[in-house]
Amino acid sequence: MTPRPWEQPPEGAAFTIAQRVAAAVPEIVTNRLRLRAPRLQDYAAYEAVFLSERAAYLGAAFDRESAFADFCQGVAGWMLRGAGMWTLCLKGSEAPLGWIYLWMEFGDHEPELGWILTEAAEGNGYAVEAARSVLPHALALYGSGGVVSYIDPSNARSLRLAERLGARLDSEAARAFDEPVLVYRHHVEGIAQ
Amino acid sequence: MTIPTLQTDRLTLRAPALADFDHWAAFFASERSVHERGPLNRVDAWHVWAADVALWHLKGYGAFGLEDRATGAYLGECGIYEPEGFPEPELGWLIVPDAEGKGYVTEAARAVMGWAHQAFGWDRLINIIDPANTRSIAVATRLGGVIDTTIPGADPGDAVFRHDLGAHA
């Protein structure tokens, strides 16, 4: 593989500035998991997920360039909107299990709570544990009902997760999109579940 | 957030902000962007710009928004860029149409070069310029840059200017 200098992590003073900027990302710890600021070392795993079948429910197909753009969009959110993408890890590990998003992708109508896991992390309840831990943060920022999850109607797994989070289907909001999408609206009652 | 703020005689160089994007998108919607891989539609412009912003978080350097010190008006961008496909960090800039021809880019770029040298100990920064972009070539030359054919560009035929940062410390 050709070297990709733009994916190489910084060193020295640049590393220090990067770390300080990344400190704007609130770290969230749950029973088993840690949600932390994304870093360039996470990107190889990100690209692997987005270039795989696992990204099939995310609209357009990804290539290397658009996967990197997506990763960067999640990072930039923290500086631009005070919310963005977390890398999800097991406590005590740096290896990504997936990513949790509290962001607005280009063209979104409202802030979105989203999630994606690596294949290896699937089936352990990590996504629901992580998404639930972000809900208080999301509702504090945007208010009860102020954050949604946009889900492909054929993505049964994510639909189930949204239900488990206590989110409610908003068919009115879905009509604003050209493509078929289900809009699940998150409410403060979801935190108690 | 600890992105530095730099001051020059006429300019404040500060962290990028969401409101800057409209200016960026307007530039990339216009023919003025033809030398910068444009024109781009708004969604593509967003992805390019968001990746530039993310550089601060991922790499510890990036582009500054330029403001008129006296009025606070947004004038453009200047700073360090390293988009996908670039061989190394690049000194870059963008100026809004009303602010062109006043030497703002030269003033901002000198501040950025001095900062990069001081903060990171870098000895050089490059400009990757479309050879048809006479305006940017003039700026690069005014800044003391020299064409260096040993450094790869990003697209075939790119002119690559090398700046010796020690000269701006």
Image: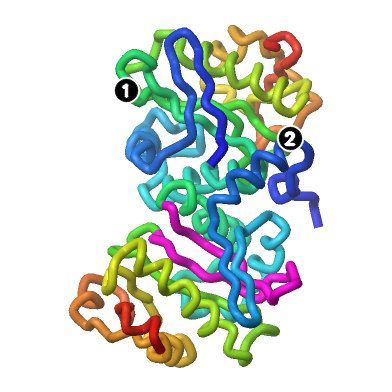
The residue shown at (51%, 58%) is A74
The residue shown at (65%, 66%) is A47
Check disc 1 and report its element: helix, strand or loop. loop
Q: Which residue is mark 2?
A: A13
Q: Chain of mark 2?
A: A
In-front residue for pair A74/B89 = A74
Which color scheme is applied?
Answer: rainbow
Percent x, y of residue A138 = 39, 67
- Amino acid at the residue labelled 1: Ala
Give neighbour class at mark 1: few <14, some 14-19, many 20+ (Cα, 10 Å).
few
- The range drawn in magenta is A82-105
Q: Is residue B68 left or right of residue A118?
A: left
Percent x, y of residue B133 = 52, 21
The residue shown at (33%, 22%) is B72
Quadrant location of the N terminus of chain A in the rendered image = bottom right
In-front residue for pair A49/B152 = A49
Quadrant location of the C terminus of chain A in the rendered image = bottom left
> Can residue A90 be found in the magenta stretch?
yes
> Can residue B152 be found in the magenta stretch?
no
Percent x, y of residue A55 = 54, 76
Percent x, y of residue B20 = 37, 36
Q: Which residue is mark 1?
A: B73
Identify the disc placed on residue A131.
Answer: none
- Amino acid at the residue labelled 2: Ala
Check disc 2 and report its element: helix, strand or loop. helix
